[in-house]
Amino acid sequence: MPNKATLEVNNQKYDFPLFVGTENEVAIDVKALRAATGGVTTIDPGYKNTGSCLSDITFLDGEKGILRYRGYSIEELAEKADFLEVVYLLIFGELPNAEQLDKFHTDIKLKSVVDDDIKKIIDAFPKSAHPMGVLSSLTSALTAFNPSSVNVDSEAEMYNAIIKILGKFPVLVAWTLRKQQGLPLDYGDNSLGYVQNILKMMFCKPNENYVENKIVLEALNKLLILHADHEQNCSTSTVRIVGSSHAGLFASISAGISALWGPLHGGANQAVLEMLEAIKQDGGDTKKYMAKAKDKQDPFRLMGFGHRVYKNFDPRAKIIKAEADKVLADLGVEDPILGIAKGLEQEALNDPYFVDRKLYPNVDFYSGIIYRAMNIPVEMFTVMFALGRLPGWIAQWREMRLRKEPIGRPRQVYTGENLRAFVDLNKR
Ligand code: CMC
């Protein structure tokens, strides 16, 4: 294979080295482009062709439908691992042994108390506030309550920031839900497992003994693993770019939550459920909505379909679809929107519009159906995505800081007015 790419600009040839990743992905290294060419830059809206970093964390092959964390396949991790093991794997690069996992969990538990004054901030939000707005504000507020910035030259300080957010974030998630439902802002039980405790914190009632549901626990463990990282997506790139200014971990994660909120990204899980519900209310006519999705004059998109990178089935969607069938059957829930979702999927898979554009169900298409069966309100779906994505954001932020990456600052090509003289107000 050649080891350089040659670019010709204004009859002048320039060579650029090729970089080949461990899975043989090839990239043209254009670091020297502007200096060599006297200021020529690249334009790539949405960064569809631009690699922003080198990363050892997640491998994704969108054509083959492959997703691996640190070399382990998503299928095997979802089947065999505990979420906290995956958290450790993503952040530190290896699966923990029993002793490492135990210490990690103990360290997280020791940092899981949230300053009680945070409750005053929660109090100030209306009950109707969207949980993603609340969560991003509370995560940002953690910086104010934990002001010491991370000294990345010290592994110990970085570790401290990581276990703090892993301890406090589930509490904020649970309190966001509890605020919405008018429930007291309590803690769970630190003798429980990490995911077990999340469920208890979310669902325990002040006047009832909390009873764990094993099916719900297993499903949540799997969903969190499936969402845990997805390389340089919109929210992760946001975390890396905010962190690249040396803003702290909590501020960077808070920015990631805001990026995740949008319906083209994590907000799609809420949008999917609302779409399926609307189709049901409208008589279940999936053909009508398929036609709307294909009509270029209509802004409607089939939510939960399509992906920037996957041009084949999203491997996470495959697992989640099977899990939706299982969880609903195990819980004895009959949800008509599962039938509508399957009907839409079948039609899309046989429709040239979707086939030609390689639009397949993504991770968000079936996840909301499981969340609903677990009694999680629809506005909380993207919060659950954030809970799962937290370790990915942390791992990517840590990698970016340890590699001492430069501040993220893209270029542009200016297309506005040339220099013109100021016109006085009375002459405009
Ligand atoms: N329904 C109808 N048409 C679609 C859809 C869709 N869901 N997605 C893409 N297209 C069409 C699009 O109109 C375009 O058609 P044309 O070539 O005729 O102009 C073509 O497919 C390519 O779409 P694109 O918008 O250029 O592709 P993209 O890579 O910029 O966008 C996407 C990817 C995920 C934003 C998009 O597929 C989409 O909006 N999907 C619905 C929202 C969604 O489910 N998002 C969750 C993504 S997975 C989880 C996550 O990232 O958090």
Image (cartoon, rainbow, N blue to C red):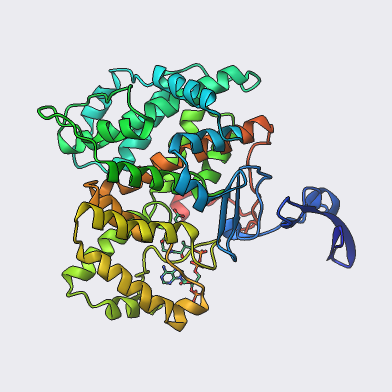
Residue 275, how many percent across, how many down?
27, 64
Q: Residue at 37%, 60% (x, y): give it.
A: 322
Q: How many marks?
A: 0
Between 284 and 323, which is closer to the camera in this rendering? 323
Residue 202, how many percent across, how many down?
25, 35
423 lies above or below 207: below
Q: Residue at 43%, 18% (x, y): give it.
A: 146
Residue 104, how many percent across, how many down?
49, 24
Residue 289 in sight = yes
**Which residue extends farthest right?**
12
In the rendered image, the quadrant that contains the N terminus is bottom right
Residue 41, how many percent across, how many down?
73, 55
Q: Residue at 45%, 80% (x, y): give it.
A: 353
360 lies above or below 254: below
Residue 297 in sight = no
User: Does residue 152 appear to the left or right of 315 in the view shown?
Assistant: right
264 lies above or below 116: below
Quarter occupied by residue 342: bottom left
Quarter occupied by residue 366: bottom left
Between 9 and 185, which is closer to the camera in this rendering? 185
